[in-house]
Amino acid sequence: MDNDFAIRLKDVKKVYKLYNRPKDRLFDAFGLLRGKKKPALNYALKGVDLEIKKGETVGIIGTNGSGKSTILKIITGVLYQTSGEVDINGRISALLELGAGFNMEYTGVENVYLNATMMGFSDEEIEKKLPEILEFADIGDYVYQPVKTYSSGMFVRLAFAVAINIDPEILIVDEALSVGDVFFQAKCYAKFEEFKRKGKTIVFVSHDLSSISKYCDRVYLLNKGNLLGEGSPKEMIDLYKRVLVGLYDADGEDEGQGKAGTGEGAGSGGAGGKEGENSSADGASKPASMMNPDTLEYGTRQALITDAYITDEGGRRTSTIIKGSEFTIHMHIKFEDHVAGPIFAFTVKDVRGTEITGTNSMYEKAYTGCGEKGEEMDVTFTQTMSLQGGNYLLSLGCTGFSGADFEVYHRLYDCLDITVVSDKDTVGYYDMFSKVEVTKN
């Protein structure tokens, strides 16, 4: 193996046999299963090639069930591949299932020695590292108490401290940087930055696309056990966004770009069809609805929001927007009765339900005319994304006035989600995109 490489996987496959009955596993081991009793095969990985150089920080992204954690477990030796080659060049520390090797009857200190010994460290090496590990965990005298008395937060803090403070050559991270309170998370990310500065090899799996964008040099994208691509974080995040909404096929083509068809009810057509597609009345396929099927809705229903979605600056349907880029909110309205001067609105909330921003066609002084029974309208709101990285919820509404009375024709709460990807977050909800100049006098 070339010394420049820390990890190399060649045509790696992982196949699980699915048995109808537990005893069929035993029969199969002795070659006694026949015919219909043969186990079904589930391919967690379908011939994956992956190469990571020393000193690189490489991300692996994909939907749930794509094979991300399977790859990490094969790299760390927790699982063995069914076929293919795996070469590792360096000592590994893995942040997979934190605390999986802890003995609940042992004290915190005893578990530090136990875990570090399993990683190949001598007692002398562990003793040198112990003060640093305990300082990082910061759980006080509880380190001398049995782990079974710990809170869940204390448990993961100690487990994380053990895994990240043993100075590995290769660090494997699987969704483990968001443990503990906000101050401990800051320490975790600072340690992560320290590893990068020292030129350690880092393999990072996360659904937090902001962290992937900020920390990774390259990214691999997996889907259903297949490697879809490898490239820069931006390229792979863009591709991942298409996978998330079913707009990616095996040939890498965008499906359903441009104007989308509409359903006959809020969030209609999102279930029961081919993945990533729905069928319209004329038999043509259209992108699957991105709307929350459990949306809370109410109103007089004189006008209905029959479809809604978000597109990025490239015109692709997505729920993931890069901070600083332009994006558009789309609403399709069908009128069931005459409506004079409809008002179209959206509101953005955080996951705790706090309303952060929003606007409507009246505030924006946009002329909407009248809607007659049977007519349909397409409404768009286009703006630059300045929210900090994170997850948000979008609510939509169609309202208006009947004489002097305010009417709600159709309102949808939390009907769409937005993930903002950012490699630089500032204080508060918004980034002011300030330009800084420093001049010496």
Image: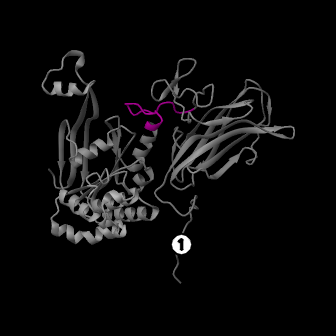
Q: Residue 253 colored magenta?
A: yes
In the rendered structure, the answer to whether residue 91 lies left or right of residue 309 reads: left
Q: Is residue 379 left or right of residue 75?
A: right
Does 305 sit above or below residue 351?
Answer: above
Q: In which image quadrant can residue 197 be found? A: bottom left
Spot occupied by residue 194 in the image (x, y as percentages of width and height): 33, 66
Q: Is residue 167 visible?
A: no
Task: Please report the residue visible at 39 percent of the width from the left and 56 percent of the height from the top.
Answer: 152
Image point (23%, 47%), residue name: 75
Q: Position of residue 310 (x, y in %)?
A: 57, 40
From where the camera sits, is residue 332 visible? yes
* Left or right of 67, for residue 311: right
Which residue, given by chain and number where applicable, does mark 1 sit on?
437
Helix, strand or loop at mark 1: loop
**Which residue occupies the extreme bottom position in the image?**
441
**Residue located at (60% from left, 44% from top):** 394
Q: Residue at x 24, y 63 (%)?
A: 110
Q: Nearest the camera: 218 or 421?
A: 421
Q: Nearer the viewer, residue 259 or 213?
A: 213
Tell me if residue 222 comes above or below residue 192 in the rendering: above
- How many numbered markers are drawn? 1
Q: Is residue 91 above or below residue 219?
A: below
Report which quarter residue 61 is drawn in: top left
Region of the chain picked out in magenta, as a range:
243-258
Q: Residues within 10 Å of mark 1 (few under 14, many from 20)?
A: few
Name, please, the residue furthest toward the top.
35
Name the spot of residue 129 as percent of width and height, x first: 24, 69
* Relative horizontal placement of residue 29, taking residue 328 as reference (left or right): left
Q: Specify whether residue 97 is painted magenta.
A: no
What amino acid is labelled 1 in the image?
Glu
